Image: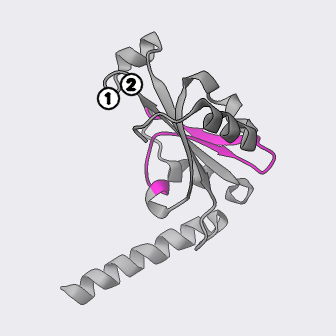
Amino acid sequence: MNQYQSEEKIAAFFEEFPFLASIVKTRKVCGVKVSRVTLDLIKSDGNFYLFDKQGLLVGKTHEDSSKTLQDELMLIDRSSVSYIVKVEHTSPNYGGYSWFQRLIGNYAEAVTVYKPPTDFSLADLPDELAKRARQEVEKEIATA
């Protein structure tokens, strides 16, 4: 999300997902989008916030931590998670981001709201991860 979006679009996004105001300041947001949870996303790290249907925060990870989204999902009641939000820091001036920019507050935030996956349930995550790992091994054996 490199391109800045209009204030109107960002405001409409915050109206649709009011719980976002509890984790980011509207004035700092430069881009918003909605996507679906994938297994690749679950295995990644970063600034993730997990919300239930009522918009209550039920878990989170931080980019400076070694904990992945998968680690956090294994610690909580996955069936209660309705939205996963990823907040990425970007530089408004240079396209990159540094610890110094975060320190002085010179950054913008790109927000992605992830809806539950369509092909599996977060409650079934351990089984799905095991199934996908078996499929990868079988594919590797078949092509060797």
Identify the amino acid type marked 1. Gly
Q: Which residues are magenta?
A: 41-63
Q: Is residue 25 among the parts visible in the rendering?
A: no
Image coordinates for residue 144, horizontal then vertical, percent: 18, 85
Q: Is residue 77 among the parts visible in the rendering?
A: yes
- 80 vs 127, nearest the viewer: 80
Residue lying at 69% horizontally and 30% vertically, measured from the top left: 21
Residue 124 vs 108, above or below: the answer is below
Q: What residue did someone put label 1 on? A: 96
Sequence-wise first label, 2 or 1: 2
Furthest residue toward bottom? 142
Residue 69 vs 57, above or below: the answer is below
Q: How many marks?
A: 2
Q: Secondary structure at mark 2?
A: loop
Q: What residue did someone put label 2 on? A: 91
Q: Are marks 2 and 1 in contact (CB under 8 Å)?
A: yes
Identify the amino acid type marked 2. Ser
